Amino acid sequence: LSGADLARMERYESDAVVTAIAAWSRDQAPGLATGRRFELRGPSIAASVLEAVDPVRIDSFVDAEGAIAEEAQELGIRSSVGCPVLVEGRLWGVIAASSKHEGAFPAETESQIGEFTQLVATAIANADSRDELIASRARIVAAADEARRRIRRDLHDGGQQRLVHALITLKLARRSLEDDDPKTEELIDEALENTEGAVE
C-alpha cells in the first residue's frame, strides 16, 4: 500500500537491542535479515521509534554508521518509515517500511503502517494472553500433582505407619493379655491412639 520495497518487524529486547523477527520483500532478491539481534547504534527506525514512541522517518542512510544503517546501505535502501507496536500500552516493537527508490514516502504512509501495527499489536496481545493461560494451566496442574504427591506421602508416612504401629501394639496387647501382664491396658490405649491418628 505504501510503495515500500522492504519491511521488517523488530522486537525491543532492551534500550539498546532489537531482534528482527519478520521481514517482507517486494521481490525475491535478498532482503532484510530476520532472527538477528541489532544494537541500536547510529540512525535507524528502531532507535528513533524507541526515543519518540511515535511514527518516524529517515530520509537517507548515506554515510550513516551502525549495523542497521550498514544493512540499509548494502541493500540499497534510501529511506524508511516506521511506527511503534504498542501492546497493551507498552512499547513492544517496531515495524519499518523501506524504499530503494528516490523520493519520499507519501504523506499517508505513517497512518497506513500505524493501522497495520494496531492489527499486529492485537495479534501479539492475543498470543501473550494465550501463553499466559497455558502457563497458568501448567502451574495449576503442577500444583495439583504436588498436592497428590504430598497426600500420598502423608498417607504412606503418616497413616500407614500409624496403622502398622497400631497392629503391632494390638498383637503385643493380645500376648500381654494371655500372660496377665498389667501393661495390657496401656498397650490397648496406645493402639487406639495410633488408630485414631491414622483415621484423622
Image (cartoon, helix red, strand yellow):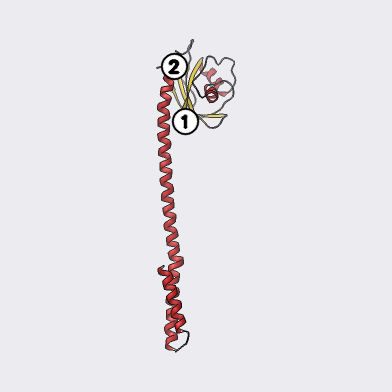
Query: Split into 4 quadrants, where in the image is the C terminus?
Result: bottom left
Which kind of residue does numbered mark 1 sit on? Gly
The answer to whether residue 14 is seen in the rendering is: yes
**Towards the viewer: 113 or 54:** 54
The residue singled out by tag 1 in the image is 89
Q: Which residue is mark 2?
A: 109
Residue 13 lies, in percent from the top left, at 53, 32
Q: Position of residue 158 (x, y in %)?
A: 45, 67
Q: Amino acid at mark 2?
A: Thr
Labels 1, 2: front one: 1
Relative height, residue 187 to residue 57 (above, below): below
- Report the front residue among 184 and 142: 184
Q: Residue at x 45, y 13 (%)?
A: 107
Q: SS at mark 2? A: helix
Q: Is residue 15 left or right of residue 111?
A: right
Q: The residue tagged with tag 1: helix, strand or loop? A: loop
Q: Position of residue 161 (x, y in %)?
A: 45, 70
Is residue 34 visible to the viewer in this orientation of the structure? no
Q: Residues within 10 Å of mark 1 (few under 14, many from 20)?
A: few
Instruction: State which quadrant residue 131 falls in.
Output: top left
Disc 2 crowd rating (10 Å Cα; few below 14, some 14-19, many 20+) is many
With respect to residue 57, does 183 lie above or below? below
The CA distance from mark 1 to mark 2 is 22 Å
